[in-house]
Image (spheres, rainbow, N blue to C red):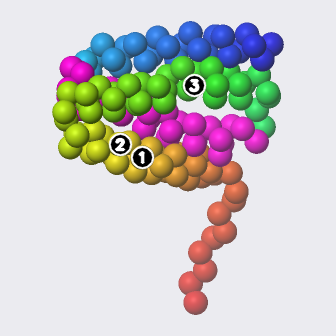
Amino acid sequence: MTYLAVLLGGLIGTGLRLGVDALLPHADDAFPVSTLVVNVVGAFVLGALVARVWPTASDALRAGLGAGLLGSFTTFSALAVSLVSLADAGEWGIAVAYLVVTIVAGLSAAWAGIRVGARGMTPMAPEVDE
């Protein structure tokens, strides 16, 4: 069941990725907006899922959503190829900016996703006026 969940998640994630790439195309020497978008969105969604869904989800669901859907939607290889393509085109400034933005935005999105996903997981104590 877990392998089937990863397969189905991978089919969906790959289709979504292709859709984003089609909506946000870029040349090899231009800032890779589509790759940045999918990686940041994927980091946020995975963070939210880890906080909200993972504690009670089955192994198959975690594998299907994590490794399957989000693993195929986001990709380190596209990040690496974009950086090499920019460097080969002599666009070192764009390459460095892309790397920094990807790391900062990805980590921030993962942090925000975990925070958003964790909301409602524990009861909030009522505030007491003193």
- Magenta region, main secondary structure: helix
Q: Are marks 1 and 2 in contact (CB under 8 Å)?
A: yes
Q: Amino acid at mark 2?
A: Leu
Callout 3 touching callout 1 (CB < 8 Å)? no
Q: Is residue 37 magenta?
A: yes
Report which residue position mark 1 lands on.
103
Residue 119 image point, x, y percent: 60, 52
The span from disc 3 to disc 2 (Cα, nearest Å) is 19 Å
Above or below, 33 against 25 in this view is: below
Q: Which residue is mark 3?
A: 71
83 relative to 40 in the view: left or right:
left
**Residue type, numbered disc 1:** Ile
Q: Earlier in the sequence, mark 3 or mark 1?
A: 3
Q: Earlier in the sequence, mark 3 or mark 2?
A: 3
Q: Residue at the location (71% across, 15% down)? A: 5
| Quadrant, the N terminus | top right
Foreground residue, 120 or 28?
28
Q: Position of residue 42 (x, y in %)?
A: 49, 33
Q: Secondary structure at mark 2?
A: helix
For image coordinates 29% across by 44% down, the residue present is 96
Check the image and report above or below for 99 versus 65: below
- Residue count near mark 2 (Cα–Cα under 10 Å), binned few <14, some 14–19, many ≥20: some
* Residue ID for mark 2: 99
